[in-house]
Image (spheres, grey):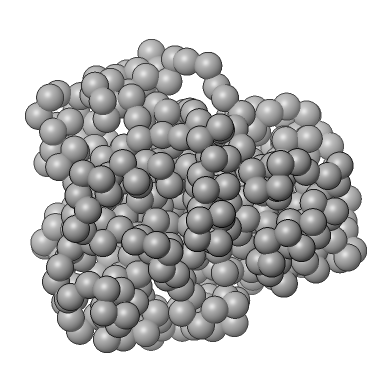
Amino acid sequence: MANQYISTRNANIKIDAKQAIIKGFSDDKGLFVLPDLSNRHVELSTLIKKDYLGMAAEILKVLLPDFSNEEINQCLHNAYDHSFSDQRITPVKSVDNFHVLELFHGPTSAFKDVGLQLLPELMRTALTPNQRVMILAATSGDTGTAALAGFKDTDQMGISVFFPDGGVSPIQKQQMLTTKGNNTNVAAINGNFDDAQTNVKHIFNDQQLKAKLGDHISLSSANSINIGRLIPQIVYYFNAYKQLVENGQVAVGHPVSFTVPTGNFGDVLAGYYAKLLGLPVKKLVVACNSNKVLADFFANGVYDRNRPFFKTVAPSMDIQISSNFERLLFYKSGEDSNMIKALMDQLESTGKYQVSAELLAAIQEDFACGYSDDAQIEKSIKTVFEQYHYLMDPHTASGYSVMRREQAKDPDTPMVLLSTASPYKFVDAVADAVIGHHEENAIDTTKELADFTNVAVPKNLAQVWSLPEAKAPVINPSQMAEFVYQRSMEVFNHD
Ligand SMILES: *Cc1c(COP(=O)(O)O)cnc(C)c1O
């Protein structure tokens, strides 16, 4: 079996896992994938006897063939030994007749910590001693925060985060401005998230900047298109299964379904990878908010982003191009890279593509999809709190009604709902749902919500308001490349 990654759009582009992690994505704009995934199995019954790190090690060995066992173990210990507040890393809580997989016990209280605590370790292991990498991230909140927490004070790497001025929640801004590190850089952009994102993509192809940075400094991405961020997320699907087995809620080998709040399709794709590796998954239920490009695709096979963009109460899912969906199309089409290239070229030029009925049916075999608008999200938060005293954040809540619909069709398969953020990261929407209003400022709302619900505020979020905050310059999108250059010189010149 071939042990190199290839581009989803060109099977002749071959690269080792280490290089794929350093680069982030392929020069032809495709995403790196390991071919033949369904022939790479892990042994379920042995795997689920291990702890989180033990499971992670077995999974990483399969998917990162050019890392030694020692390297993998070292990376895992550095990433997870001290950064999560629950020793299970991703604990499962049973609520009514479903189970919530809580992914928010990391340093920034969002599920992106699981990937972004490990990615810097994998990347540093992959670098040769004189290579330097500046990570670029455009963020609508969670990615930038978690990436700063993951990359701060790491050797050989720096990070520059760009957020839309006025476009992130107060607590997310506070988290970013209080992350201290000798290699962290944050700037607010005059513009929206798409302006920041588009310019980050331009910077990756800016030949003038590359020449100025020289051979030993390269640029990379902390987005979920990087396999080094995607692969760590496979582990928690196995970890959820393990906990259900231990609690007598499923017999080893019996199927389980998962409902996953979805934006860029990274989280739910990791569930599909888990299934290909041997986890007995019945259905992966994709949940969207009002930006429901995917829900429409599942209904008719047409992916069409030509539509109004909604700012919702679940902003981390306000996405119209789910980048990782390309990887699913790759596997489901029988690894047909020519077709993937044709579809993605169409998406780029017309904002739209259609797949064959056969390919749609193959996808529907493993996946279902639905969406919740803002009113439904708030209703779900309220219902679940009042009936079961479980407090969900708006992203998690987008999955609730979608999950219930699926459970009605298949009541006998145990269902796990992935919870992607602490409710205290999105206090306005959560307070509106359960109390009926929120306060002018987030500190007051947080306190009122905690008093009302008796649900504890995570320590890191409680402390963030009293930390000294740095200032972020506000710059125009046209100044981003210069910002990256200046900061790269500052971060790397002394070593
Ligand atoms: C990023 C994010 C999502 C979406 O995850 P994808 O991997 O992009 O599908 C959902 N919820 C929260 C809170 C997030 O931060």
User: Which residue is drawn at the image coordinates 64% and 32% (left, top)?
Assistant: 193
Residue 96 in which image quadrant: bottom left
Could you tell me residue 242's position as x and y percent?
A: 30, 76
Comparing 325 with 452, the one in front is 452
Q: Is residue 301 visible?
A: yes
Comparing 465 with 17, the one in front is 465
Comparing 337 with 299, the one in front is 299
User: Which residue is drawn at the image coordinates 40% and 81% (left, top)?
Assistant: 53
Q: Quadrant of the C terminus?
A: bottom right
Comparing 73 with 210, the one in front is 73
Left or right: 309, with 178 as reference point: left
Could you tell me residue 482's position as x and y percent?
A: 75, 38
User: Looking at the image, how many numbered discs can be counted on the residues?
Assistant: 0
Residue 336 in which image quadrant: top left
Left or right: 475, with 378 as reference point: right
Could you tell me residue 263's position as x and y percent?
A: 46, 40
Could you tell me residue 199's position as x and y percent?
A: 62, 31
User: Which residue is drawn at the image coordinates 61% and 37% (left, top)?
Assistant: 313
